[in-house]
Image (cartoon, grey):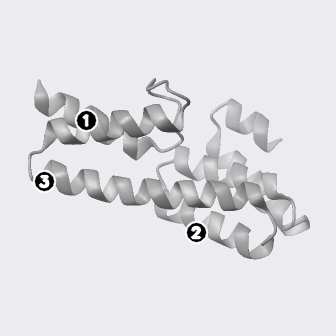
């Protein structure tokens, strides 16, 4: 059901369903990953990262969770760097940096909406807006 809730953009129900699934079977990696994605969609970035960290502890042999965790940590660092650059009014640098990241992480397509990280999309939009 969680995947259906996610597709319907009912992220709260998705989270609740994932929590129940994790209680019943904490070794099912898809529940952790779906929960993480729902949290990202809700803008709960730090909590989403903690979810993946907990999933990695519960299922240390999961390559999928480790891969998503590495990506999430890298994106958190990228968000922090972009915020610092925006404060320094380095709008072009932020836009180019995020566009390059999105392109590399999505197989060459910088199409917005491909990442789960709404904060990256927001920062890209802010840099665009400041540039006029």
Give percent across and percent down for residue 38.
Answer: 62, 47
Distance between mark 2 and mark 3 Cα atoms:
27 Å
Distance between mark 1 and mark 2 Cα atoms:
28 Å
Relative to residue 62, is residue 126 drawn left or right? left
Could you classify mark 3 by the number of other residues whose Cα lies within 10 Å: few (under 14), some (14-19), or many (20 or more)?
few
Determine which of the numbered discs, if any, sits on residue 50 in the image. Answer: 2
- Closest to the observer, 10 or 69: 69
* CB under 8 Å between discs 1 and 2: no
Q: Which of marks 3 and 1 is in front?
A: 1
Q: Identify the element where label 3 is drawn.
A: helix
Give percent across and percent down for residue 110.
Answer: 43, 26
Relative to residue 21, is residue 53 drawn left or right? left
Could you classify mark 2 by the number of other residues whose Cα lies within 10 Å: few (under 14), some (14-19), or many (20 or more)?
few
- Closest to the observer, 17 or 63: 63
Relative to residue 14, is residue 9 drawn left or right? left
- The residue to which callout 1 is attached is 95
- The residue to which callout 3 is attached is 87
Q: Earlier in the sequence, mark 3 or mark 1?
A: 3
Give percent across and percent down for residue 18.
Answer: 77, 55
- Closest to the observer, 57 or 51: 57
- Closest to the observer, 97 or 2: 97
Give percent across and percent down for residue 112.
Answer: 44, 27
* The C terminus: image quadrant: top left
Q: Which of marks 1 and 2 is in front?
A: 1
């Amino acid at each position: 059901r969680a995947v259906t809730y996610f597709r319907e953009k009912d992220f709260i129900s998705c989270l609740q369903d994932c929590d129940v699934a994790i209680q019943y079977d904490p070794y099912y990696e898809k529940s952790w990953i779906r929960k993480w994605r729902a949290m990202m969609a809700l803008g709960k970035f730090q909590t989403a990262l903690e979810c993946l960290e907990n999933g990695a502890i519960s299922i240390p042999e999961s390559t999928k969770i480790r891969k998503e965790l590495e990506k999430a940590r890298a994106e958190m660092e990228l968000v922090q760097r972009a915020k610092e650059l925006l404060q320094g009014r380095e709008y072009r640098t932020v836009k180019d940096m995020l566009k390059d990241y999105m392109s590399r992480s999505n197989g060459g397509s910088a199409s917005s909406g491909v990442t789960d990280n709404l904060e990256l999309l927001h920062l890209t939009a802010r840099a665009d807006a400041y540039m006029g």
